[in-house]
Image (spheres, rainbow, N blue to C red):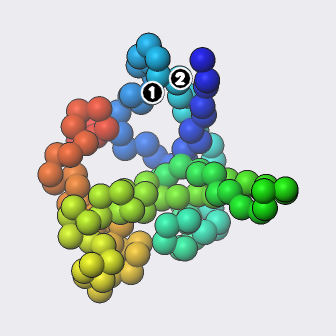
């Protein structure tokens, strides 16, 4: 069975990882905490990762078919959430992110998503 590793950084605001509850037929995903990549630019908002930020490293592929390349880039958790559910909470290209910067919109998206209780008991401690 395939095994995948997700690298995350920063204070983890969600509860136990669902990935630890491997179900038959699903690939096992392990998580590994790494030091926050302070100063590196977030793939989502293009702002520097700062002390206290949290998120994960994502693979950014490139190059050519003959010479593929891959690099790990940090992504704020909120910036990833904005890309996935921003439209559902009214923060997307359609609304011009309500005039907010991408980082501000991502933080607001996280606030609205939490208010909806969308994560449930698995992801939030409070």
User: Residue visible at 26% across and 66% down?
Assistant: 87
In x, y percent, where is residue 100? 32, 81
For the image, the number of numbered tags is 2
| Quadrant that contains the N terminus | top right
In the image, residue 35 sits, relative to residue 98, either above or below, namely: above
* Nearer to me, 80 or 108: 80
Residue 52 seen in the figure: no
User: Extreme left residue here?
Assistant: 116
| Quadrant that contains the C terminus | top left
In x, y percent, where is residue 118? 20, 46
Q: Are marks 1 and 2 in contact (CB under 8 Å)?
A: yes
In the image, residue 31 sits, relative to residue 126, either above or below, namely: above
In the image, residue 109 sits, relative to residue 93, either above or below, namely: above
User: Extreme right residue here?
Assistant: 66
* Nearer to me, 31 or 4: 4
Say few, some or many: other residues with alpha carbon within 10 Å of mark 1 (under 14 / 14 to 19 / 20 or more): some
User: Residue visible at 46% across and 17% down?
Assistant: 25
Disc on res. 28 = 2
User: Residue visible at 21% across and 70% down?
Assistant: 90
Disc on res. 116 = none
Q: Secondary structure at mark 2?
A: strand
Q: Which residue is mark 1?
A: 19
Image check: 80 left or right of 75?
Answer: left
Q: In the picture, residue 97 is in which quadrant?
A: bottom left
User: Extreme front residue here?
Assistant: 65
Q: Earlier in the sequence, mark 1 or mark 2?
A: 1
In x, y percent, where is residue 2? 61, 23
Q: Secondary structure at mark 1?
A: helix
Q: In the picture, residue 113 is in which quadrant?
A: bottom left
């Amino acid at each position: 069975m395939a095994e995948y590793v997700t690298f995350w950084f920063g204070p983890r605001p969600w509860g136990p990882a669902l990935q630890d509850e491997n179900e038959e037929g699903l690939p096992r995903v392990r998580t590994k905490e790494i030091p926050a990549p302070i100063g590196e630019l977030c793939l989502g908002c293009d702002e520097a990762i700062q002390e206290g930020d949290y998120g994960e490293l994502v693979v950014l592929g490139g190059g050519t078919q003959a010479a593929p390349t891959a690099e790990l880039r940090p992504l704020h958790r909120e910036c990833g959430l904005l890309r996935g559910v921003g439209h559902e909470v009214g923060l997307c290209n359609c609304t011009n992110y309500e005039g907010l910067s991408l980082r501000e919109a991502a933080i607001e998206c996280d606030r609205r998503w939490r208010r909806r209780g969308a994560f449930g008991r698995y992801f939030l401690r409070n």
